[in-house]
Amino acid sequence: MFTRRHIKHSRLLLRHARKYLRYKDDLLSGSDREEIVAGMKSLRDALRQKERERIHSTADTLDKTLHRVTPVTWESHWRENCEVILVAIVVAVGIRSYFLQPFKIPTGSMQPTLNGIIGHPSTDPAPNILRQIGEFIVLGRNYINVVSREDDQVFEIAPKKMFFFFTFSRLICQRQNFLVYASPETLSHDFNVYPGRICHRGEIIARGAIDTGDQVFVDKCSYNFVKPHRGDVFVFRTN
C-alpha cells in the first residue's frame, strides 16, 4: 500500500528523463542520449531487483547526468511557472464556460427572491475608513461621495470596467469629470443622476451607500439534462 520514498523518487526521475528525451531528442548529441538511456536502463534494473543501495547510486548518477545536459538558467523557472499559470487559466476558463459561472445580480428585478445592486442615498458623510473596509468585506457595501466643484451640467454617464470585475461610471460634465464606483443604472435609478441634470457649486450629486446584493454561481451544466423545478434559481438568455 505504501511505497518507499526512494522508490517514488526513482520512478519520478525516470518519468522526468523520458519526458526530457521526448522534448530534446532532436537536440541531444548521440553520446548524451546514450548516457541518459543507459542510466534509465540501470535504474529500471535496480528497481526491478529492489536493491536499495544500487537504486540510490543509479538514481544519483542519472540525476547528475540530467543536470549536466540541462543546466539551470534564470529563465527555466519562469518557463515552468508560465506553464502552470496557463494550465490554471485554461482550467478556470473551462469551468466558467461549461460548468459554473459567477454572476452578480445587477438590478432589483428578481426581488424578493434575489436582491440586486441597491443604492441608499444619504446626505450624511461616510463612516470612518475602518468601518468602510469592514462593511465592504462583510456586506459588500461601498460608499460614494460626488460633490460638484462648480456650477455645471451632467453631459454623459459612461460605464467603465476596471480589472474585468469592477464596474465604474464616469460622470462627464461640461467642466468637470468624476469616476464613481457604481454602475450607470444604479446612479440613475437610485441617486437620480441623469444626463442633463444641472448641479451648482458645492451641491451633492450622489452620496450614500451601495450594497452589492446577491452573487450566485450559474449552473451551466445540469439544466442541459434535467428540467428546473419550482423554486430553483437559474439564469437564461432572452431575446
Image: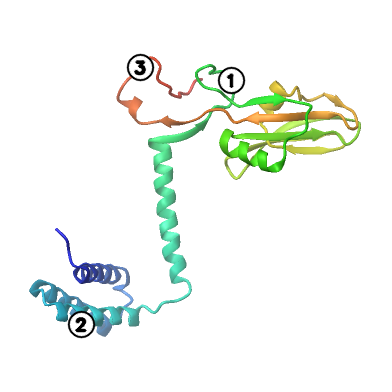
Q: Residue at x 76, y 25 (%)?
A: 193
The image quarter containing residue 184 is top right
Please, what is the three-letter code of the amino acid marked with disc 1?
Gly
> Which mark is on residue 234?
none
- Residue situated in front as seen by the camera: 99 or 23: 99
In the rendered image, the vertical position of residue 71 relative to residue 133, given as above or below: below
The image quarter containing residue 18 is bottom left
In the drawing, does residue 118 fall left or right of residue 30?
right
- Residue situated in front as seen by the camera: 178 or 112: 112
- Measure the alpha-carbon separation of dots 1 and 2: 70 Å
Report crowding for label 3: few under 14, some 14 to 19, many 20 or more residues within 10 A (C-alpha).
few
In the rendered image, the vertical position of residue 112 relative to residue 45, given as above or below: above
The residue tagged with tag 3: helix, strand or loop? Answer: loop
The image quarter containing residue 159 is top right
Indicate the position of residue 177 as horizontal and vertical percent values.
80, 38
Q: Which residue is mark 1?
A: 108
The residue tagged with tag 1: helix, strand or loop? Answer: loop
Q: Which residue is mark 3?
A: 229
